[in-house]
Structures are given as structure tokens and as C-alpha cells.
Amino acid sequence: MEDFVLSHSDPATGLPVGPRDTRAAGDFTSEQLLAAVLASVDDDKAEDVVQIDLRGRSDVADYMVICSGRSSRQVAAISEKLADRLKEQFRVLAKMEGKETGDWVLIDSGDVIVHVFRPEVREFYQLEKMWMPGSTHRGA
């Protein structure tokens, strides 16, 4: 199968630009996908993992996960292994953007959007501050 690439993500919100993928109902829940994402990034030693519930706040996804890798190489490895695991476990072809540079990789698995950052880049964009409950700025 062909790997899909997002056209781009919106730096203001950190969300992918484009329509949300559809899948057959009952295959798996967004919570099962979230659990697999969290297990994968934990297995690969991602740091400062934050999960954000987007249900009722965004039509793009149900959850967002933000984490950091210590280097560009680790960011790319966390991202690639996550995409491979989701394909193996759920037959999800996650769309990925930014793996080439390894500064900020966006993985769009449909119900769960994952951002893997180098720490400096994460600090610059501060996506979790925008999306965490109680923040004054809400995403689209």
C-alpha cells in the first residue's frame, strides 16, 4: 500500500489540514488506538508525554498526544515505530509529516493525532498550552 503524506499541518493549532479519514465502525475505538499510541511512545522512551481529550472541541480527532524525543534521530524513530505498530495492530495507515527533519513529526492516525517534538521546538510552539482544558485560546 502507498504511504500517505499530509499536505501540511496548521502551526497555530498543530492539527492536520485535510479531511478526517473514515473507517468501518466497530473495528476499534479511539480509546484503544490512544492506548496503543501511549504504549508505543512509552516503549520508545518518549519524554513528557501529554494526552489531550479533543472530543467536543475539534472534529479532526478525538485525542491529541504530545511528546518529546531527545534528538532528531529519536523523534524520527519514535514516529516511525508508532506508524509501524498502528499498521500492524489496527491496519491504520498513519499519515506522517516532518520525519525528514526530525524536529516536529505529526502522525495522523485518524482518531488520535500525535506530535513528537525535539524539546526546543516543543517549547517554541507550546501546543499543549493551547489545547489543555482551561486554556484561554481554543483551537479550531
Image: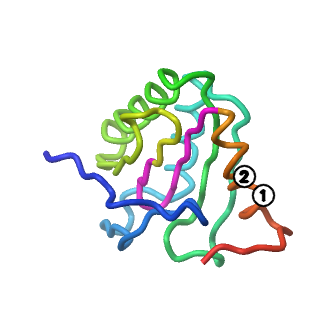
Helix, strand or loop for the magenta stretch, by majority: strand
Residue 8 falls inside the magenta stretch: no
Residue 129: image location, x then y, percent: 78, 58
**Is residue 37 shown left or right of residue 45?**
left
Q: Which mark is residue 94?
A: none
In the image, farthest residue toward the left = 1
Residue 100: image location, x then y, percent: 36, 34
Residue type at the position of mark 2: Gln
Q: Which quadrant of the figure contains the C terminus? A: bottom right
Camera-side residue of 55 and 31? 55
What is the secondary structure assignment of the residue under circle 1?
A: helix
Q: What colour scheme has been applied to the protein in the rendered image?
A: rainbow
Mark 2–mark 1 CB contact (< 8 Å): yes
Residue at the disc numbered 2: 126
Residue found at x 56% / y 49% = 34
Residue found at x 57% / y 22% = 71
What is the secondary structure assignment of the residue under circle 2?
A: loop
Residue found at x 64% / y 78% = 56
Which span is picked out in magenta?
107-118
Camera-side residue of 98 and 134? 98
Residue at the disc numbered 1: 129
* CA–CA distance in space, label 2 to label 1: 6 Å
Q: Is residue 113 above or below residue 68?
A: below
